[in-house]
Amino acid sequence: MRTSIATVCLSGGLVEKLHAASSAGFDGVEVFEPDLVAAAESPEEIRALADRLGLRLDLYQPFRDAEGVTEEAFAAVLHRAEAKFALMRRLGIDLMLVCSNVGTATIDDDEVSADQLRRLGDLAGRYDVRIAYEALAWGRYVDDYRRSARIVELADHPRVGLCLDSFHILSRGHHPAGIDEIDAERIFFLQLADAPALSMDVLSWSRHHRLFPGEGSFDLVGFLAHVVRAGYAGPLSLEVFNDTFRQSDPRRTARQALRSLRWLEDQTAARLAASAGLAGSMGSADALTRLTRAGAPTGFDFVEIRAADAGEVETVLEQLGFGFRGRHRSKQVRLWTSGAARVVCSEQQADGTEPRIAAVGFDVADPVAAAARAAELLAPAVARRTYAGEEVLPAFAAPDGTEIFVGHGGGWVAEFGGGTAGAAAPEGAVRAIDHVNLVQSWQDFDEAVLFYASVLALEPAPVAEVAGPAGLVRSQVMRSGRGEVRLPLNLLPAHQDDRQGHAQHVALACDDIVALARSARERGLVPLAVPANYYDDLAARFRLTDERLAELRDLDLLYDRDATGEYLHFYTPTVGGVFFEVIERRGAYDGYGAGNAPVRLASQLGR
Amino acid sequence: MRTSIATVCLSGGLVEKLHAASSAGFDGVEVFEPDLVAAAESPEEIRALADRLGLRLDLYQPFRDAEGVTEEAFAAVLHRAEAKFALMRRLGIDLMLVCSNVGTATIDDDEVSADQLRRLGDLAGRYDVRIAYEALAWGRYVDDYRRSARIVELADHPRVGLCLDSFHILSRGHHPAGIDEIDAERIFFLQLADAPALSMDVLSWSRHHRLFPGEGSFDLVGFLAHVVRAGYAGPLSLEVFNDTFRQSDPRRTARQALRSLRWLEDQTAARLAASAGLAGSMGSADALTRLTRAGAPTGFDFVEIRAADAGEVETVLEQLGFGFRGRHRSKQVRLWTSGAARVVCSEQQADGTEPRIAAVGFDVADPVAAAARAAELLAPAVARRTYAGEEVLPAFAAPDGTEIFVGHGGGWVAEFGGGTAGAAAPEGAVRAIDHVNLVQSWQDFDEAVLFYASVLALEPAPVAEVAGPAGLVRSQVMRSGRGEVRLPLNLLPAHQDDRQGHAQHVALACDDIVALARSARERGLVPLAVPANYYDDLAARFRLTDERLAELRDLDLLYDRDATGEYLHFYTPTVGGVFFEVIERRGAYDGYGAGNAPVRLASQLGR
């Protein structure tokens, strides 16, 4: 379907916003009035620019406090509307958003509102434009789309239609099934926004916390399915504002926005197809964009740590019992493995940076399909030089710049040689990569959730919060259905950088953490120190035997338990921007020991 | 009364927190358990440090999910409690906070809860400690202080008392009058927190948005009056956490915290004294700290703009019709005046900085009293060198470093000489300083509200939000009762600096802005450009005559109107970090033209 975005979603001036929407690939925009009012360019100049950029100006918005008013007040409404209709002609926009009255409504009567909309429609006709009436969630009298639909029906005017906005409908908990009964010709416009599940006043929620589809908790797929089934064939437009987007690069926000729409169209098409046998009508589903099918990864292929000097990282890997598999035949990279866990260390001397997770490789069923899907979702491709006879792994960049590789079967391992591998694996050795924790800045966090959900089909778990000595850390785990792949995303507290105890880390699974902790110590590892007070608290919380407690204390092991099982873990020292966690899951424990994170953070900060 | 602060209010490790609380002047702290658990220091070392710092360890907190449980679950509670009581002995703490059950309660019965608290009290007796039971606002069954009081009464155990927390009571809208009926001996502890009026789930409100008394919307004065009238004589303790404090310098947070308590004690004493004739008992009011009386300022004395080179600022002042009153007899400062508006320009070559508002002088009835009050409220004194025969103005620093001077009568003006003043004031000249807009960083904002409210007795107006091209700007006006002094505080969007269109400004009042705008242009001023689209929008919103509209447009004047009057204004270009606004208020208009701020911001950013 045609795509559009409200200029209020993007930061900057109106000209910058138009360029950003165009460069992302949007078909059109909604012009947010304050953006035009503050612009130095005339309406004619804006129109010409949009033409040059190939953008349709789909909607002029918002026009407030129009109906449900006294006749005296309505005279002023008509004066105001006429000026705006004339302006729309100059802009070449044929549709205006009219919100349900918040401020000046005094008459709670559908007939009065319908009559006033009808007269606005007559006036709109003289300028050859139309109006789309929208029920705001906080409208004084009209706050439900079923009522705005009834008023539009009563108005019964060819220039008066409806605007549906997912936020205003879903934030009130109104069921979208009523959309099925609306005449599609009456739906003049569709605005889409997601939002996190919050319990706060709906106006603040709307102004500060809207998100693009796929980043929040609304069932937008179900919502759009109703609209499509109703037969709506106009543009899908995003009206999303939050405190982050307002401060972000508008080009990047626009790309993220279009990604969300493509994902939403694809998901909706799949939902409609699945229910077609039951529900009958598919409405305008054929117009929905479909993405290349590619399932979730089935495991981690590798993690790449890049540094000017990776020596310290390799020392830690050796202490953890990893075997050195050798150098790559043509690149400056070295491979370390333990069981199925593969860590690639790459050195870029010119780089000069501290060790960081530069890339994460995933095992997927069809790497070519996965890469095609990523491209359709506007993930920037990453090119790495390969030579004849080497396996080519497609790669693309995550929002924070981490390179994501998709491969199958790990044939690339054979390109490494000259290592000391083959030596017997130590007792209790690392078996696999359990999870990779990627720290996100505030600019990247929501986009990363959408990225991993749409591109890699990972599912977002509920958001958790962890208190550290320098602020709350928001954490959300993206995972494949059965947990083969887990990516906890940690939001860096604002105004901090990752030197303040918020490094990335790779968690390595083993089957006997006590043995591994011992052997690692014998090989020289000094694990992150855990304070004695922590073990006193453990003793109070859990009935552990003295022997068990002493063992945990002696080895600096952290412990968690829930109804399903136990979690034991320890941490290596941080090297640059990276550390390792070694974990053992016992029973069906499926968490990450979040309750221990404050202790870990304090210890890393030396507090 | 004795003052205390929960360590969770302060950022950093436990040792840092103790130092911060001590250096601010607190008498004690509440030890937040996770701070102790994460500390490398033993309980004995923490106790010894607190002793050295002169801090009493008033409370160990929190102990969760203790009552309303099955007998089986209660056995685990007793195990956990005994370990904590033993720990408290090591710390030398004799009081533990027990919160009403959130997670494990299955029995909604006051008798059961009372019985379990009584048995906890017996156990506490064996360790010579006590417990204070608190109703959390989100407790599963017990979420009202009147119910927790009833349970404590039922328990009827000398070691079982009540903790009252203003957040948990006022956030639920529970009236504090019931406190009057509680036996003061049962009130073991008092926790104080303020909060903004928000409509959101109470748990998030509590975790992220608590504020120190005087920074939010709760009536803490009324609350504390009830507690004091009940006869409570224990410590006043702050339990406040929000996302800002967790990331701020703990020493500074601690000072801000103690300021809030002193202000609260003083206000409460005044409230009790005022109602003494009516209400009878003053309870423990004599123990409340009283501050030196000093009323709100009666006007602006001066604004000082400091720069390496103030030449450009002086040019703008001259264009606005200010007269040059000359140099100071001993300092590198120059005085410009127009009517009652006085602007001092100071040059500090070594400084090298762009022009900024360095100081604001206020007219007060008694400068010595005002300065004494500021010192009692922990405002850092500012020393400026004065010479024999010169007027000494007391000065102290606001949270953002702005120097606040308090004077009376403006006798210091006579210390300036050699200017060209005396020349006839131009037509429509500036009459006075109307307001001074001080941009605050996120670290300073809430503290600034408390600072101006407590030190200068200014009243906070409701918070407003203004959309700019680079983010929402939060704005709160601090003003004296009749508006003689107005200080709008603007919160800089996070992650931005003031070069992005968020400079400070001085608003100058005049009686004929059209004449002044004309004469300023004749003197060479090029005012901030206002886009033509703005005037099209004005025409739609207000019925202005074409002549009037043309006049506004020609002079780049902005316009606002409400039921009480009109507001006309224009802006000078920004010089470094400062610009001037010239305003004319017509009728009883009392606002600031906030609706025009986005246009101003966009124009300043050149967007």
Image (tube, coloured by chain):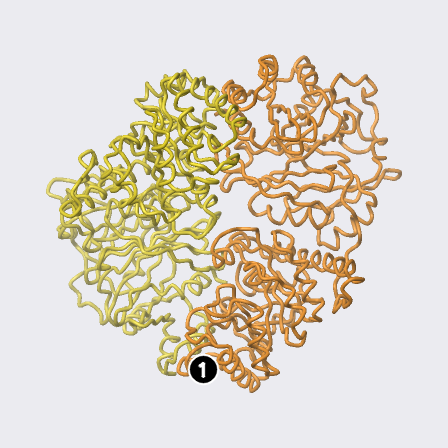
Chain colours: A orange, B yellow
Chain label for disc 1: A
Q: Amino acid at mark 1?
A: His
Q: Which residue is mark 1?
A: A79
Q: Residue at x 46, y 50 (%)?
A: B200
Mark yes or no: residue B329 visible.
no
Q: Residue at x 75, y 26 (%)?
A: A431
Q: Count of labels shown?
A: 1
At which x and y percent is residue A13? 52, 62
SS at mark 1? Answer: helix
In the depicted view, which residue is nearer to us: A369 or A286? A286
Mark yes or no: residue A55 visible.
yes
Q: Is residue A184 above or below residue B337?
A: below
Q: Is residue A151 above or below residue B439?
A: below
Task: Give the class, few, some or many, for how many residues have Cα within 10 Å of label 1's Cα (few <14, many ≥20).
Answer: some
Q: Is residue B316 above or below residue B279?
A: below
In the depicted view, which residue is nearer to us: B224 or A528? B224
Q: Using residue B268 as the reference point, say whether residue A276 is left or right of it.
A: right
Q: Using residue B490 as the reference point, say whether residue A443 is left or right of it.
A: right
At which x and y percent is residue B16? 41, 27
In the depicted view, which residue is nearer to us: A254 or B219? B219
Query: Quadrant of residue A175 in the image?
Result: bottom right
Q: Is residue A393 above or below residue B589?
A: above
At which x and y percent is residue B318? 27, 62
Q: Using residue B241 as the reference point, say whether residue A400 is left or right of it.
A: right
Query: Quadrant of residue B325 in the image?
Result: bottom left
Query: Quadrant of residue B110 in the image?
Result: top left
At which x and y percent is residue A111? 51, 80
Q: Residue furthest right?
A: A389
The N terminus of chain B sits in image quarter: top left
Q: Residue furthest left?
A: B389
